[in-house]
Image: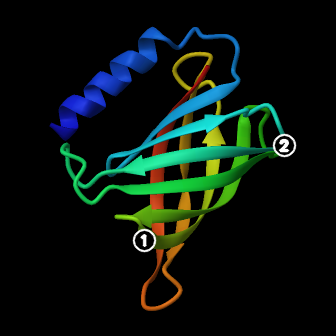
Amino acid sequence: MKKLLLITSLIGIFFVSSAQTKNWTASYYHKNELGIALFTQGQFYPELRIQAENEYFDNTEVSLFVRNDLSVELASDVNLSWGVGASVIDGEFGNFRVPLYIVKKDVLAENINLMLGLELNSDFEDKTKLLPKFGISLNF
């Protein structure tokens, strides 16, 4: 089912990759994490992510981020994207999350971006993890 979701998402991304307004972004991150960022033209913008352990959305983790994109002088189509956020699992505080990505813009089509980075994930008590993150996004 995960492969079907990924294939369907990629097909959808290719079909709508010619969208021109670029006011919001839909993202897919590995490990079944879907994200929607709104008002991406501003300096800081909100992003909502939903991560499910399976296709039935059991133990769903919902995260809210404040994100920012910085231009990197290495290349004109590379950005550094970072954010600060928190997640909720089953109605309780889950984790504090700080993602940092290198974003390669216009990878396969004009509005498709590739993201590669790390995420600091901590519950402030027992667990603190530095997780690798990989994602693809589509700007609308």
Look at the numbered discs 2 and 1 and tell me whether their residues touch, using CB distance below 8 Å. Answer: no
Seen as rendered, the residue at the extreme left is 1
Q: Compared to 85, does 27 lie above or below?
A: above
Q: Amino acid at mark 1?
A: Glu
* Residue 56 position within the rendered picture, expressed as x and y whole percent measured from the top left: 18, 45
Q: Compared to 62, does 25 lie above or below?
A: above
Q: Quadrant location of the N terminus?
A: top left
* Residue 4 position within the rendered picture, expressed as x and y whole percent measured from the top left: 19, 30
Q: CA distance from mark 2 to mark 1?
A: 30 Å
Splitting the image into 4 quarters, where does residue 100 fall?
Answer: bottom right
Nearest to the eye among marks 2 and 1: give it.
Answer: 1
* Left or right relative to 4: residue 71: right
Q: Amino acid at mark 2?
A: Gln
SS under mark 1: strand
Label placed on residue 135? none
Residue receiving disc 1: 92
Residue at the spot x=53%, y=86% of the render? 124
Q: Quadrant location of the C terminus?
A: top right
* Residue 138 position within the rendered picture, expressed as x and y whole percent measured from the top left: 54, 26
Residue receiving disc 2: 43
Residue at the spot x=71%, y=39% of the render? 78
Residue at the spot x=45%, y=67% of the render? 131
* Residue 73 position within the rendered picture, expressed as x and y whole percent measured from the top left: 84, 44
**Badge 2 local density, few (<14 within 10 Å), some, or many (20+)?**
few
SS under mark 2: loop
